[in-house]
Amino acid sequence: MPQSPESLVLIPLQSNWPAPKGVRAYLSTRQGGCSSAPWDTLNLATHVGDEAQAVQRNREGLLNALTKPGDARSERQLKAQWLDQVHGTTVVEARGDGEVRRADAAWTQHSGVVCAVMTADCLPILICDRDASVVAAVHAGWRGLAAGVIDSTVTALAVEPQRLLAYLGPAICTRCFEVGPEVRESFLEGAKDDVQRAGIAECFQASPARAGHYLADLVELARGQLLALGVADIYGGEMCTVEAPETFYSYRRDGDTGRQAALIYLE
């Protein structure tokens, strides 16, 4: 039975990620909310076939849940920037004006504007700077990673990369992510030198199930790109969406399914 949005379960990242005071970051789960199967129950995506009214209630409940008990500020002041994600490299400034923007990353310097990206196996990346002056959320599937969505986001933030902190959210793990040779080649073609090429190659293991295929490490591919850009403070990357069916949606596991979100904002 679908639940009310008030029963939704969020994972706060404050204890797992040393972001500065003033930065709030959360992961939604599939628990709580009001969507019916196969999107049960806290689906946040409008493009997967779920009822629009259920998704809207889930999104409203999510924003309401971000308030700490006893917070005098009305949670209605929080505005989320939802994206029409297309596995590209476009980065937009989050406005919180109700407009859905076509992009795969969003950033903001304004308090109360929530940067949100939805995933169901792709890697969500949350970024902030040490001064709590800017935050960003990145949707990083393999296509976006290979095309340079992380580079585009770091460039858009206009902050020295050494002053950035990144959190790698739940995504499909190496054990579950079999890909064809074209995926490996797309990353290798973007290597700037032999050292980077060797690092990329280490992220692909020969698949024991299918000849000519590979098990890809999405997390390490992202970590390598962040390090190459100068972002050294990187956390997370331990949660697999496929292997946690009670907690996370997974497209690779279920096909017709919902989407969870990674969210970050300035208080």
Image: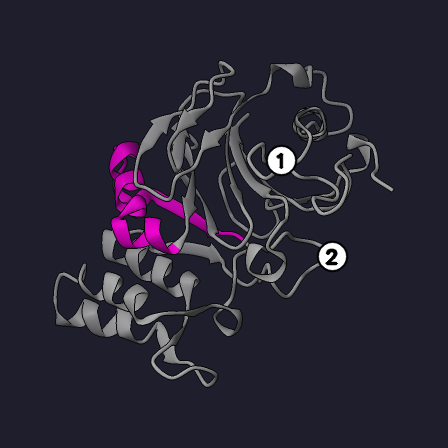
Q: CA distance from mark 1 to mark 2?
A: 16 Å
134 on left or right of 32: left
Residue 226 percent location from the top left of the image: 31, 54
Query: What is the span of residues highlighted in magenta in the rendered image?
Result: 142-169
| Residue 164 shows in the view | yes
- The reply to whether the magenta stretch includes residue 156 is yes
Quarter-of-image position of residue 129? top left
Q: How is the image coloured?
A: one colour
- Looking at numbered disc 2 in the image, what kind of residue is underneath it? Glu
Structural crowding at the residue carrying mark 1, measured as other residues with C-alpha within 10 Å and reported as few (<14), some (14–19) or many (≥20): many
Residue 245 to residue 3: above or below:
below
Helix, strand or loop under label 1 = loop
The secondary structure that dominates the magenta segment is helix
Residue 206 to residue 167: above or below:
below
Structural crowding at the residue carrying mark 2, measured as other residues with C-alpha within 10 Å and reported as few (<14), some (14–19) or many (≥20): few
Q: Nearer the viewer, residue 258 or 170?
A: 258
74 on left or right of 176: right
Residue plotted at (57% across, 62% down): 240
- The reply to whether the magenta stretch includes residue 170 is no
Image quarter hosting the C terminus: top right
Q: Which residue is mark 1?
A: 44
Quarter-of-image position of residue 180? bottom left
